Image: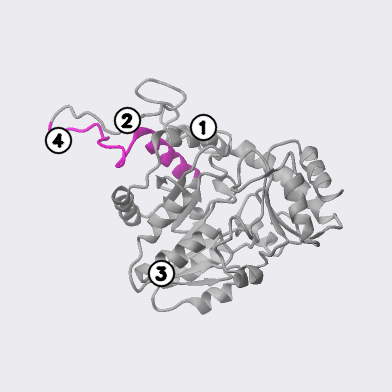
Amino acid sequence: MSQDHCCTKIETIAVHGSKGFDPATGAVSFPIYQSATFKHSALNVSTGYDYSRLQNPTREEVENTIAKLEGGKAGLAFSSGVAAITAVLNLFHNGDHIIVSDDLYGGTYRLFENIVNFHGIGHTFTDTSKIENILESITENTKAIFIETPTNPMMKVTDISEIVKIAKERGIITIVDNTFLSPYFQQPLLLGVDIVVHSGTKFLGGHNDTLSGFVVLNDEQLTEKLRFIQKSTGGVLAPFDSWLILRGIKTLHIRMERQQQNALAVAKWLKGHNSVEKVYYVGLPDHEGYETNLKQARGFGSMISFSVKDKALVEQILSRVKVVTFAESLGGVESLITYPQVQTHADIPKEIRDRLGITDRLLRLSVGIENVDDIINDLKQAIEI
């Protein structure tokens, strides 16, 4: 039976994937088709696979799986999240203008500031959580609105439906980076968004063992354009990495639930600590974006940022944590702590970081699936000497 007829709930789709098994062999674990090219039985006769840059059965399975999870018609897998975003930005041309969330992953900022600019594509960074900022930033050449929600690292929440309404009235493409919440907690396409992007390295993979990126969409014309860009620029996801993401997705729902549960407990503990100045976690009811997130998502995720009162505590915490690992990235089963100012957001100018709140006292925490008491006790011993 086709998976299209047996899987309706996101948890089941995550476990079984698109096809659910390898139709050629019956293998329950979808095989790694580690082949660069494929045999033709005759001239103009193809199995549907010719060359792995164009398509590979393992990559096809993960692409179709992420599409189903997001409620989309098509998925495209890339070698990293930045590669996926780069492909999307190749849809635009000299003279076009894009509105972009001002608080976002440093690599995306670098891409807009140092690469996209050279192609004559203009952009405006603005706080997209304020709808009036969107309206003020629209020009006659605005072709897209690119948002993160929640944002990285300040956890701002943008009202997706309002952005979609504004964009559709003006023929503007909407793009949402859904990395932080994953399709388990948030499905922007179902809210009318045109394109969803992911760093699959994070929650989709979930084990800090591979890089990947995804683009998911419904529009056939945009899909064909992006498939052409994908095969022409070549930043595709390799078969083994595709299999790793498929394996990771099988436990997406279980991991996201446990990580969120842990994150809420950690956020509450941090909020009550006298050495912590402020906690940024969307799941706290006093968070500015709490109600908006409730309206458009099923959960709050497991990303927390917090600022400490004393700058000296930053180095102390980073050097003393044991259960929590001081490392870049996020979304894996292990809890990771990052110093955005010198790691993920180092390419953003200091004056912009300071304005956003990415100060020398801000830390970002990706809460994992460990025992929550161990996480909290580790943070406690790192903060308190």
Residue under circle 3? 117
Residue under circle 2? 35
Residue under circle 4? 44
Q: Is residue 83 visible?
A: yes
Which numbered disc flags the more N-terminal residue, 4 or 2? 2
Q: Amino acid at mark 1?
A: Arg
Which numbered disc flags the more N-terminal residue, 3 or 4? 4
Residue under circle 1? 247
Element under disc 3 = helix
Reply yes or no: does residue 45 show up in magenta.
yes
Q: Position of residue 192 (x, y in %)?
A: 48, 59
Q: Position of residue 116 (x, y in %)?
A: 40, 65
- Whether tag 1 and tag 4 are in contact, CB under 8 A, the answer is no
Query: Does residue 239 lie above or below 262 as drawn?
Result: above
Q: Position of residue 66 (x, y in %)?
A: 47, 43
For the residues labelled 3 and 1, the Cα–Cα distance comes to: 37 Å
Q: Is residue 7 visible?
A: no
Which numbered disc flags the more N-terminal residue, 3 or 1? 3
Element under disc 1 = helix
Q: Is residue 206 left or right of residue 145?
A: right
Q: Position of residue 146 (x, y in %)?
A: 49, 63
Q: Is residue 214 left or right of residue 366?
A: left
In the image, 318 versus 80, the foreground residue is 318
In the image, 257 versus 323, the foreground residue is 323
Element under disc 2 = loop
Q: Amino acid at mark 3?
A: Asn
Element under disc 4 = loop
For the residues labelled 4 and 2, the Cα–Cα distance comes to: 20 Å
Characterize the local packing of mark 3: few (<14), some (14-19) or many (20 or more) Cα atoms within 10 angstroms: few
